[in-house]
Image: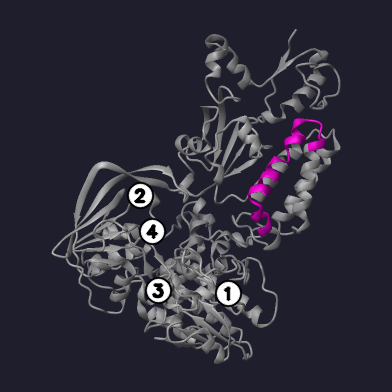
Amino acid sequence: FGFSIKISTGAGAFVCGESTALMSSLEGRVGRPRPKYVHTVEKGFRDRPSALNNVETWANVPVIIARGAEWFASIGTEKSKGTKVFSLVGKIRNSGLVEVPMGTALREIIYDIGNGTLDGRAFKAVQTGGPSGGCIPEEFIDTPVDYEQLTKLGSIMGSGGMIVMDQDTCMVNLARYFMEFLVEESCGQCVPCREGLKRLLQILTDICEGNGREEHMGLLEELCLVLRDFSLCGLGKTAPNPIMSTLRYFREEYEAHIRDHQCPALVCKGLVPAPCQNACPAGIDVPSYVALIGHGRYQEAVELIRQDNPFPWVCGLICVHPCEKVCSRGEVDKPISIRSLKGFAAKYAATMGGYEKKKLAPLREEKVAVIGSGPAGLTAAYFLAREGYPVTVFEAAPLAGGMLRVGIPEYRLPKEFVETEIESIKALGVEIKTNTPIGRDVTLDDLRNEGFSAFYFAVGAHKGFRLNIEGESDFDGVMDCIDFLRKVNLSEEVDVGQRVVVVGGGYSSMDASRTCVRLGVPEIHIVYRRSKDEMPAMEEEVREAEEEGVKIDYLTIPKRVKGRDGKVTHLECIRAELGERDESGRRRPIPIKGTEFDIEADTIILSIGQTVDMAHIIDAQDIGVTPRNTFRVNPETFQTKIPDVFAGGDCVTGPASVIEAIGAGKKAARTIHRYLRGKPLEKKIYHAVKRMKVEQIEVSDEEKETLKRPDIPMLDMKKRKTTFEEAELGLTEEMAKNEAKRCLRCDLHE
């Protein structure tokens, strides 16, 4: 005699608890789950053997009978036979039910079937098995999916749920979400499950709201073990999986919530003033200055920005605006044009009397030396000067500003704008010595003898990489992108001929190609080895380069430099196709045999990355250098192995954006201040601080429907292509006010 029961709970992992409870109900008794060790195949409905399976299992029976057990066993792995249906959902392009053979790799399911994550965001983890399944991180994406492998990773097959998560998923909040569901699903019969789940949810909620304590992580682990070992049914025994797996693989996120009061994914409302502010490396109070602009209080907006960033005008023109990528308005239509609003306010303030001079702390005795006058170095100098320290900035080049002056073309960043903001830093008492390389003529010991008490290295990554292909060093006409841009910015004569090929797809390659347009070069190619979707440069820069006549050859790999009489004539390339994803998460370009072709070139400009030139820093090895040719520092304090020496910016992270350099300089200044005051160095991330509360702008319903993100006015195309005048004209006052009204004011929402 057999009796089958099917329970449609949406979570197959719970079937042993809820289904046995239903068996009891059918028998006329109180519906309570049985202990897991009482197997229904031995003693089920009315104490008789009962087949207790879900619909998916029963659906396999007819085809096995029709085709035979050997056919079924030929599919899958040695211990996990057949196929499995997964509900593929989450941050995935193609969602739905998919059936694959057991042993299919997670990567194949997510990328080949699911077509990868939404909007090209970085894959972070996948949760399998329904609400009580575990989270598997990116490092195990090549794992074959079967019962044994999932169990080994701390997850389960369960109901066949497969939830894909990207970089914007908070793993702590995710665990909290599943605990909410599991608390509701618990029948409450056994104490470990009934009380333990509630306590786990309470702890996770405290952590997400910023009330977490160090002992909470240990308590979570202890409670999870109690539930797993002493719960009566499968729900309680598997319920700890979301917490245990996220603690196992994403422990640093728990630590960030508890120790740093920061949610790295910008999700937890109790820790995030607003997504835009938290995404800003400098921690600028974005919603408040946007609101001030909407109220017409432009000078106040700029001074609010300058509490966290001494370069509002620079960033208003060239910032890569990570704030806009997380802007909540983007979920409605388009993100707020935050960068352009900053540029509008800064330009207004600069032309209406200049920036206000910041108040300084009383003058201190300890002198600080900053090596490098790029955005990281000058930002550190700015904040240290405000703390009262005498600061001297040493710059090897003839002009201060680093890449702001020599690496970014004038059509994007006019020199006078940079000079205006450097002067505002000098006005605080910061001394800048140009043509003074540290390590060649002056050593750190020399500076110590002059009374300097702390040092901050902020040298840029100005040395370009080579292609290392045949012919690269055999002919004149192959040059580094940064060298090319430096010569143009310093008004040196540069002859690149009539045909230029730029190799690379980042910001500098766009700058180099568009600079060539303005130099009158008639034929310009950008060669990039991947597709447009993988290109690092911002979408608007790529579009503007193409509008100006630059041709971009995607999926093209340089193979050989050709020349004649010692001069470059061609770049031989080969077409490529995208293969499997590499460690960066992008699909690897694979050359297609027999597709070689030549591009004519008088000059080949290489823009495939930069590194720090440590050759002229004679103290570098004593300070400590990594294999990547960057300074080795404590990642939390920026201190090197020499206690009075700190480093940050490109010389630690490698090439990064201006706003990231500014954020690094700001954080390093705080650490150096604590060092000089004899305080313990804070081993934590500096979370964003809300600077002020600005009232919301009243906008009528009719106006809300008409407000749209504006197109930034551009210089006439003829002038754009023939002069180095500023290409972006910026927002008008009316446009700026209207754009500020579009802000949803996430910072005011509880």
CA separation in Å, label 2 and label 3: 27 Å
CB atoms of marks 1 and 2 within 8 Å: no
> Which kind of residue does numbered mark 3 sit on?
Met
Q: Does residue 601 appear to the left or right of 72 in the view shown? A: left
> Which kind of residue does numbered mark 1 sit on?
Ala
Secondary structure under badge 1?
Answer: helix
Q: Give how far across and how far down residue 707 sits, in percent.
A: 46, 58
Q: Quadrant of the N terminus?
A: top right
Q: Give how far across and how far down residue 59 sits, in percent.
A: 59, 17
Residue toward you, 711 or 486: 486
Crowd tier of the residue under label 1, counting other residues whose Cα lies within 10 Å: few below 14, some 14–19, many 20 or above? many
CA separation in Å, label 1 and label 2: 36 Å
**Residue marked by disc 4:** 537
Q: Which mark is residue 403?
A: 3
> Which kind of residue does numbered mark 4 sit on?
Ala
Crowd tier of the residue under label 2, counting other residues whose Cα lies within 10 Å: few below 14, some 14–19, many 20 or above? many
State which region is magenta.
229-256
Secondary structure under badge 3?
Answer: helix
Instruction: Return the residue found at the far top.
Output: 1
**Residue marked by disc 2:** 530
Q: Earlier in the sequence, mark 3 or mark 1?
A: 3
**Magenta stretch encompasses residue 237:** yes
**Residue marked by disc 1:** 668
Q: Earlier in the sequence, mark 2 or mark 3?
A: 3
Secondary structure under badge 4?
Answer: loop
CA separation in Å, label 2 and label 4: 12 Å
Eye-nearest disc, 4 or 1: 1
Residue 116 lies, with reference to residue 206, above or below; the image says: above
Secondary structure under badge 2?
Answer: loop
Residue toward you, 153 or 382: 153
CB atoms of marks 2 and 4 within 8 Å: no
